[in-house]
Image (cartoon, rainbow, N blue to C red):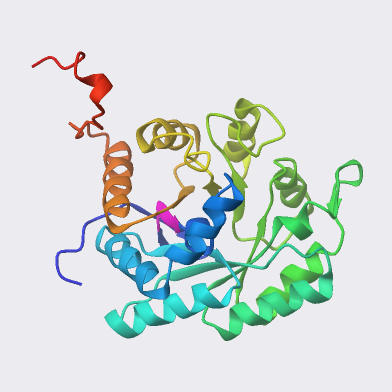
Amino acid sequence: MQGRQFFPTVKIAGLEVSRLVCGTNSFLGYSHYTAARDQWLRRHFTVDRIVETLLEAWSQGINSIVGPCQERLAESLKAFTEQTGNRFIWIGTSLGSPDMAQQKKDLEFLAENGATFGMIHCGYTDTHLLSAEKRVEGLPELLQYSRSLGLIPGVSTHRPETLPVCEAEGYDSEVYILPHNVLGFLSPVEIEWVANIIRQTSKPVINIKPLASGKLTPVEGLTYVYNAIKENDVVCVGLMSPEEARDTATVARNILLGKGERREMVFTPSKSTVQLR
């Protein structure tokens, strides 16, 4: 694609992954807000609109996407590739079933539909975590099954203690997914604990929910997370439009490159008295 922007990358399982990756909750109708917003998102995000946003994300140097084994996402990624000849690294996750047989079916879907990674969803991981025994029941088998399908195995969790358990037991996870934001949204422990666990984890961590599902601005959320994590970690943000893809990528790029920026301010009539000129 002509004029593609530079974006910093890290190596995950030998692949160059942009340090900002595209999330998919908005595309698939998971707002973490209201059922009404979920309904609107599912109606709004046709395959064409998803592709439109992905085109801008790609042009900004974002080369990877985190998302579950769902038909609409698979169809959208296929349409993007057919239209451009380019291919996102699909960091695929299973769905939330605690049933191992269903988890294996989800991984098979990912392998059949072009995903690069096969991450075990927190719906399985967190329901099978036995903290006192320092293990996740059945997880080694699922990670092995993911790799046997040609996927790169990984673990998604909402429980920070999962990471040291997996590291201590030597589970075959090339990368982890964990919520991390300055509000502590979707985290059971203080943000200092989350950040410390991430920094002590040898494998890369994909930090999801950095904007707490829209409760933080990109400057607020990304500045905290990028400064709290390791240099080989990445951040995942859901994008609602091409404009948002461009703006979020610009904020993240400037933070990573140590550049300040003069941002266009969001104006409302109530701010008319605080303008300097």
Say which of 189 and 202 sits in front.
Answer: 189
Q: How far across and down, in percent of the image, does residue 252 sit?
A: 33, 43
Q: Is residue 138 left or right of residue 155?
A: right
Q: How far across and down, in percent of the image, does residue 19 sit?
A: 40, 51
**Relative height, residue 194 to residue 176 (above, below):** above
**Relative height, residue 171 to residue 109 (above, below):** above
Q: Which residues are magenta?
A: 18-22
Q: Is residue 202 visible?
A: no
Q: Residue furthest left?
A: 277
Q: Is residue 2 left or right of residue 178?
A: left
- For the point 69% across and 66% down, the residue is 95
- For the point 91% across and 41% down, the residue is 132
The quadrant in which the N terminus is found is bottom left
Q: How far across and down, in percent of the image, does residue 168 sit?
A: 76, 48
**Relative height, residue 155 to residue 130 (above, below):** below
Quadrant for residue 161, please give it. top right
Quadrant for residue 45, please give it. bottom left
Q: Residue furthest right?
A: 133
Q: Is residue 114 visible?
A: yes
Q: Is residue 223 left or right of residue 95?
A: left
- For the point 86% across and 43% down, the residue is 131
Quadrant for residue 86, please give it. bottom left
Residue 20 drawn in magenta? yes
Say which of 80 and 206 sits in front.
Answer: 80
Residue 199 drawn in magenta? no
Q: How far across and down, in percent of the image, does residue 100 sit?
A: 83, 71
**Number of numbered discs present?**
0
The overriding secondary structure of the stretch rendered in magenta is strand
The quadrant in which the C terminus is found is top left
